[in-house]
Image (cartoon, rainbow, N blue to C red):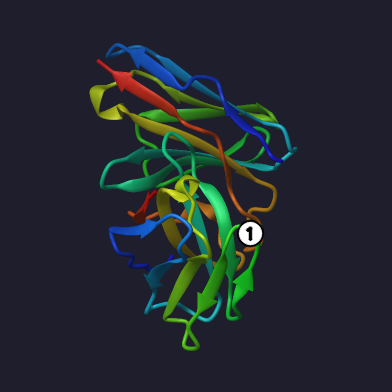
Amino acid sequence: DVKVTQSSRYLVKRTGEKVFLECVQDMDHENMFWYRQDPGLGLRLIYFSYDVKMKEKGDIPEGYSVSREKKERFSLILESASTNQTSMYLCASTPYLGSYNSPLHFGNGTRLTVT
Amino acid sequence: DAKTTQPNSMESNEEEPVHLPCNHSTISGTDYIHWYRQLPSQGPEYVIHGLTSNVNNRMASLAIAEDRKSSTLILHRATLRDAAVYYCILREEGASYGKLTFGQGTILTVHP
């Protein structure tokens, strides 16, 4: 089974801090994603990456950046955390970006609280 | 991605079948229907997908209407572990996952 591991389940940070969320997948998938999930808003795509050092903005990239130095690891960075970034963050991966037959595999999420 | 409409919530009793509906009246000919579910405190999990024909796997069955404007996810015997939020999603073949949209989903409650 594919395993997508997010380094922290719960995180509490202060406004203005730089925050790193880490995600590792063990199935050699090319494509990795960061979503945030908020009540009433569903899942929203922040960034995704289709190869090492490659990234593309999703629907809500403002206030975030990403890093993919190795294939298995995709990091989400909050440059200066704000309270409106309090959310559940979900990492996902998939082997084939354009294939209908390629499901997303999700981690269990990091619940970030910014105070 | 085309829009889907699902009921906000449904309830079932344990060991009974559950039919979760999804309307997608603006579906295009190349849109695949995917279902995911999200158990409490976990990330979403792929359940099943199909295009035109009904599909079965170890988790569930997917029944697709002849005009493809609606579909139904069928859990044949609900268990307490099936209590989750179920998402119906349309995905066009070849489309980037950057455009995959998870809506509100249906909250399924299973009673013992």
Query: Would you place residue A76 above or below residue B92 in this image?
Result: above
Q: Residue furthest bottom?
A: B66
Task: Kindly identify the residue that appears in the image at 49 percent across and 45 percent down.
Answer: B81
Residue A71 position in % (x across, y down): 70, 32
- The picture quadrant where one finds residue A98 is bottom right
Residue A35 position in % (x across, y down): 44, 40
Q: Give A54 or A8, whichever is nearer the viewer.
A: A8
Task: Kindly identify the residue that appears in the image at 75 percent across and 38 percent down.
Answer: A28
Residue A92 position in % (x across, y down): 56, 40
Q: Amino acid at mark 1?
A: Gly
Query: Would you place residue A24 above or below residue A51 in this image?
Result: above
A90 vs A60, left or right, is right
The total of numbered circles placed on residues is 1
Residue pointed to by mark 1: A98
SS at badge 1: loop
Q: Is residue B90 visible?
A: yes
Q: Is residue B2 visible?
A: no
Q: Chain of mark 1?
A: A
Task: Kindly identify the residue that appears in the image at 54 percent across and 54 percent down.
Answer: B97
Local crowd size for mark 1, using a 10 Å CA cut-off: few (<14), some (14–19), many (≥20): some
In which quadrant will I find the C terminus of chain A?
A: top left
Task: Kindly identify the residue that appears in the image at 59 percent across and 77 percent down.
Answer: B54
Residue B43 position in % (x across, y down): 49, 39
B2 vs B30, left or right, is left
- The picture quadrant where one finds residue A87 is top left
A37 vs A109, left or right, is left
Query: Would you place residue B10 above or below residue B27 in this image?
Result: above
Q: Give A37 or B70, whichever is nearer the viewer.
A: B70
